[in-house]
Image: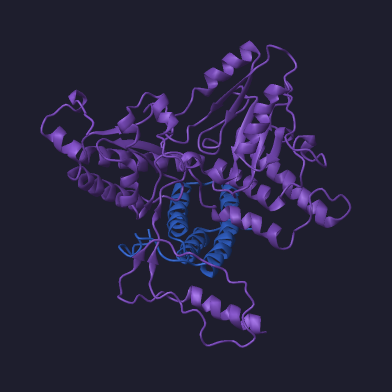
Chain colours: A purple, B blue
Amino acid sequence: MLLRVAWRRAAVALTAAPVSKSGVPIRGLRVRVVDHAVQSSVPSDTAPAPEAESVLRPLYMDVQATTPLDPRVLDAMLPYLVNYYGNPHSRTHAYGWESEAAMEHARQQVASLIGADSREIIFTSGATESNNIAIKELEAAIQPDTSLVSVMTVNNEIGVKQPIAEIGRICSSRKVYFHTDAAQAVGKIPLDVNNLKIDLMSISGHKIYGPKGVGAIYVRRRPRVRVEALQSGGGQERGLRSGTVPTPLVVGLGAACEVAQQEMEYDHERISKLAEQLTQKIMNSLPDVVMNGDPEHHYPGCINLSFAYVEGESLLMALKDVALSSGSACTSASLEPSYVLRAIGTDEDLAHSSIRFGIGRFTTEEEVDYTVEKCIQHVKRLREMSPLWEMVQDGIDLKSIQWTQH
Amino acid sequence: MAASSRGQVLDLYRAMLRESKHFNNYNYRTYAIRRIRDAFRENKNVKDPVEIQTLVNKAKRDLEIIRRQVHISQLYSTDKLVIENQEESRT
């Protein structure tokens, strides 16, 4: 009873209409702390005051890092988080049977998106685990000359599309296994494992508006591709991946795949249009902007631009109202410039000036316009402050400068 | 069973738009409104009554999804985006 009073008070505090002391909302993020502590037995009048300032959240333009759940996906998952909580491997009762049916239905949804058979889909905890399973196959190779080619379908930093069909054809003719990490490509561009001659494919849930913590690996059956299990246990998923399959998560992955299949064309057209707008507006308003990555073989939703004479991190900080990144999330903790940019021959200084813009299913034209406006504004401002920019304006060729030690 | 009439389809369209406007989340709200408009527009010339009925049935299921998800989005509401104060337009 007392706990309920404390809970109700906390709930009111959290959802109360934010009242600003000065009337000006703060930009940023509110940290939500769920207070589980059993309050003192006396419901006190000194309950934590509701936050007096209102907070405005930044726009989300970092879809390569992760995507929001599509409401249709959450809707599919919820029943399995509320009432249908059976273990899908329980063979003896209805809870198990209904959970298993959901799991198999999800498996079929994933298979259908990539032109595979559902027996070729193994659920994992994500694309990283799938990649590890695929690579481990190399160690389990039985013939001395068997090898594996592993290529990303769409690069997560610059959005370049690899020539998968050609690679598949070459691998197939040389009897070499072909694996692709399709995390950024599945559900966004058409992928058929048979047309492209793919033997192994990694799929990630949270890159396609599905839940985090789930993925899949496609393992070709004909001709049979042998993989070795990374984790052993009860033999689930044909012995390739032991552990109880998390029904709510795989239902989410399946729903995400089905929605992606239905929406692929619509999303691609809209995202292409928005990407064109973003790039054109920025490049028409600012000089010395370079788009990284082959413009012809490019997935439109991932735009990587280098702004010369501006430091990437400082631009990111300046654009605090927009959630952006300057490279892949998995390497964002290190200060090294992106290995991808280095590999495509980008100049060191341009590599430090790159920003990645992500456009997704839920991105609006207004968000793109706002981002473009802020980007132009801050690049101009930062360039004004830059001595390098000043020198360039005076006609000095930076490459001719002899920098000396002090 | 008689196929859905033009009036029924329009009622469904309006009901879906009306419900979608209540999403607390800016991105879900704008997506739902945009997608509904575009989907109905795309299918406005379908003549086959069986196909029309299939589309109507799917729309009815989607309306139920929207109803539930709108409710959840209101239960777990959070602060607005920086862009929402500037434009009140809900397109």
Q: Quick one: quadrant of the N terminus of chain B?
A: bottom right
Q: Quick one: quadrant of the C terminus of chain B?
A: bottom left
Closer-to-camera residue (A82/A322) = A322
Give the quadrant of residue A26. Answer: bottom left
Horizontal side of residue A95 vs B19, given as left or right? right
Give the quadrant of residue A283. Answer: top left
**Could you tell me which residue is drawn at 18 percent across and 37 percent down?**
A389
Q: Where is residue A281 in the image (x, y as percent from the top left)?
A: 26, 42
**Image vertical order of residue A319 relative to residue A13, above or below:** above
Horizontal side of residue A235 vs B86, given as left or right? right
Q: Position of residue A358 (x, y in %)?
A: 41, 43
Residue lying at the far front in this picture: please name it.
Answer: A406
Q: Number of marks in the image?
A: 0
**Image vertical order of residue A213 relative to residue B3, above or below:** above
Closer-to-camera residue (A174/A142) = A142
Q: Where is residue B24 in the image (x, y as percent from the top left)?
A: 47, 65
Q: Position of residue A195 (x, y in %)?
A: 59, 23
**Image vertical order of residue A285 relative to residue A8, above or below:** above
Q: Is residue A115 visible to the viewer in this orientation of the structure?
A: no
Closer-to-camera residue (A116/A210) = A210
Closer-to-camera residue (A275/A146) = A146
**Could you tell me which residue is drawn at 43 percent across and 61 percent down?**
A29
Q: Is residue A213 visible to the viewer in this orientation of the structure?
A: yes
Horizontal side of residue A336 vs A405, given as left or right? right
**Image vertical order of residue A323 relative to residue A302, above or below:** below
**Could you tell me which residue is drawn at 36 percent across and 52 percent down?**
A322
